[in-house]
Amino acid sequence: MNWSLNKSQRDGLIGSAVLSLIILALVGAYYIWGESYQARILYATFVNLLVVVGLQVFMGNANITSFSHSAFMGIAAYVAAICVTPAAMKAISLPLAPWGLNAFELSPIVSALLALGITGVLGLLTGLFIARLTGVGVTIVSIAILVIVHSIFLHRTDIFKGNQAFFGIPKIFDLPHITILVIVAIFVARLFRESALGVQLRACADDEVGARAMGVNVYRIRLIAWVVGTLFFATAGIAYAFFLGTISARPFYFNFVFLTVAMLILGGLRSVTGAVFGTLLITIGLEIVRWLETGPTLLSIKLPQMLGLSGLLLGVVIVAVMAFLPNGIMGNSEIEEVLKRKT
Amino acid sequence: MDYVIQQVLNALSFGAEYALIALGLAIVFSIMGLVNFAHGEVIAFGGYSMIIVATLLTANPWVLMIGVLAFCVLASVVLERVAFRTVRRADLTTGLLTAFGVSIVLQNLFLLLGSPRPMAATQFIFLDQTLTLGNIRVSSLQIYETGATIIAIGLLMLFLRKTTLGVAMRAAALDFEMVRLCGIRANRVIAGAFAISGLLAGLACIFIMARRGSVAPHMGFDPVLTAFVACVIGGFGSLPGAVLGGFLLGITEVAVLVLLPQSYGGMAQAAVFTLVALILIWRPDGILSPALDKGDKI
Amino acid sequence: MLQIESLKVFHGPIEAVHGIDINVPEGKCVTLLGTNGAGKTSTLSSITGTARATGTIRLDGEDISRLSIEERCKLGIALSPEGRRIFANLTVYDNLIMGGATRRDKKQLTADIAAWFVQFPVLGERSSQRAGTLSGGEQQMLAIARALVSNPRILLLDEPSLGLAPQITAKIFEIIRDLKTLGMTILLVEQNASAAIEVSDYVYVLNTGTISSHGDASKFGDGTKLVDELTGVHR
């Protein structure tokens, strides 16, 4: 195998490095000026970032909308949580669990690998079908996956606790861990985009018939991208469970799907830079709106409590981006291209 | 025997509700290629309009029904004008995401201006009574629902076959530009499609409200998700397909509830969606649509 | 009746027609000849309003180049498009109803449709059949009839002989000749040079977006010389 990089791949490394610096700057700013409650916000942002960058891998390169990512994230989160939680704790939180699920415990690393493995296998199995479909067919089947997985979470309360919290997960990750994960994810996603596979996948997105005529195996590369994306979601799910200590089925459904999809399309789904910027922008916007939602006192005027404002904003962002900025902020360009153009 | 008839009626009335909503989705999709997920919020808006009319004007259920229909038509047409006109020529995914966006906006507006909790609106509950026919006891609402759906489908068919606008709508499903070249205004055709879609949503709203007796911000989302599935099964954009898909889903859902043990009740939705995934993998364009070759110049 | 001045037509960023002038007098049949990609269909699209264009397009002296597709149709521009584009899912009758959709006099419309069914008996026989089941030639007749039921002031015919057998082509040109005797103003786009020249009064030859020659139809003889010129054949 030839490991030397071509020009766009070298550019990819530069771009990823620039994005990583932005991430590090954010973390640094938190350690210098931040207050402790902001660690949680930053952590959540980075979990979202993992998901959105993972979305970019399949959705962005193949230009096919898929909605199943929070299902895969949920599966990984639950597998990791069930494996890593001490047996004594599970005796309380999952007293009715079948198959001895509440009678064992594994180390964090084994738990995480198991979660990645199981999610990856599920990704492969679903991918075998997904990769055969095109366009809106993928979207529909991905919605089906989301609904089916969610129904199972809700139905098997003995394993997943449904909408109640599954608690007692030890806190294993903290900000440094996820920072590293995010940076690795950015590099992987970017290098995937610039790899032969990524280029072929983007070619299919532009002209499937043309790409096939050039000998591109559309089915194979879609499958690979789908599974790679799934692993990103799994990582995000594990990071989520390893930090929060409790999980429930509710976050792994449509609301989270829309949140992350909005982040991706705002930034521009065709570039990794777009995925990163979209995530950061929407997170900042939502934090401001969430603060407004609680009814704060602004300039000595007590604002009323306005539940639903953050959701409203999210919807407006989606509609506005689709209407006025269909290619997102970044369009097809990555950060190093923008920087070069400026200088 | 009693049990069988009840379950058949159950399947029919579920199917009728899905078919009504699915038709509303399909008529818009067939003309402008938009999967209108905000359709559910039009239904929810119909529910809220009941509260508005009942407080401001009168609680007479018949007036309220007309109100619900009118408000749903209005909401649907306004949505097209405000949100969907800009993405009229965009691809499917853009339209789908826009519709989801609109749906989120509306849900949160209901939350913001109404209440996050369900609000009571019980004026239509009287439709739901237990009838005793001989020694069989059935719900009157289910009979009304099935009957009204069949009548609505019949009227819609008449409209699409006998009026110029109806014929234009069918023609637009095939070649919108050619319809414009015949001098029929695009806005009129699309507004017509949204108005019909709204009317169907209003009808569905009346029956949903008769069953629930309350209105909540998210109440439209699940029915539309299921109706969307019905459209997919039948073949998206095909009106007969939407009806077929709706009734098929109703039957499947009841069958799952009847055949699976009680404790699996929550899995009905999962079963339905598994069915959809399988059908799509078998026939990516749905049951009632002809296979299309990729690379065809259309 | 139809005057086009310095017309440029664009497909996205590409300029397909580079500033042409065309004049179609009332009651005459004018033909646009040219090979594939010469810009014939683009020119027609700019007249109907489906393509982006600059320049002026006048119908009876009134500039219509800013009007929408639908408004132009209402002013009396009817198109029988390339590839026929009949509504395959509708019946033959409903296709004609679509053609006459702009007309207010619905009773007269029904009578006109009946009259066209006499003119085109094949269509009359198949009036309640789905249009997609018609043969190519029948579909072309339907496309022409659909354009005519709107009672247009000018009829635009885009390659009516495309993909048809010689006998059917002859029949289509017979129809065009009949229309001309009825006094219809026609702008015909064709690749079949000899047949087109025969039915028309005036000919414009379009070559990669510009008019390379024009003149009375008699000037072009039977068109063989022109075809050789356009296709680069030297005999």
Image: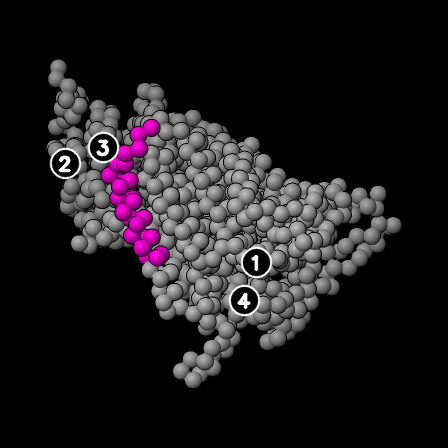
| Residue A228 locus on image (x, y percent) | 45, 40
**Which label belongs to residue C37?**
3
- Of all chains, the one bearing label 1 is A
**Marks 4,2: beta carbons within 8 A:** no
Kindly identify which chain the residue marked by label 4 belongs to.
Answer: B
Tell me, yes or no, whether the two marked residues, 1 and 2, touch with CB atoms within 8 Å: no
Indicate the position of residue A156 as horizontal and vertical percent values.
Answer: 67, 49
Left or right, A121 with reference to A260: right
- Part of the protein shown in magenta: A1-24
Q: What residue sits right under mark 2 in the picture?
A: C211
Spatial CA distance of label 1 from label 2 is 77 Å
Chain under callout 2 = C
Question: Taking B17 as reference, is C132 above or below it?
Answer: above
Residue B110: mark = 4
- Residue C217 versus residue A185: which sits nearer the camera? A185
Q: Is residue A159 left or right of residue B35?
A: right
Asked if the stretch drawn in magenta spans residue C48, the answer is: no
Residue B62 seen by the camera: no
Choose top left, top right, bottom left or bottom right for residue C189: top left
Q: From where the camera sits, is residue B215 visible?
A: yes
Nearer the camera: disc 4 or disc 3: 4
Q: Tell me which secondary structure the magenta stretch mostly adopts.
A: helix
Q: Secondary structure at mark 3?
A: loop
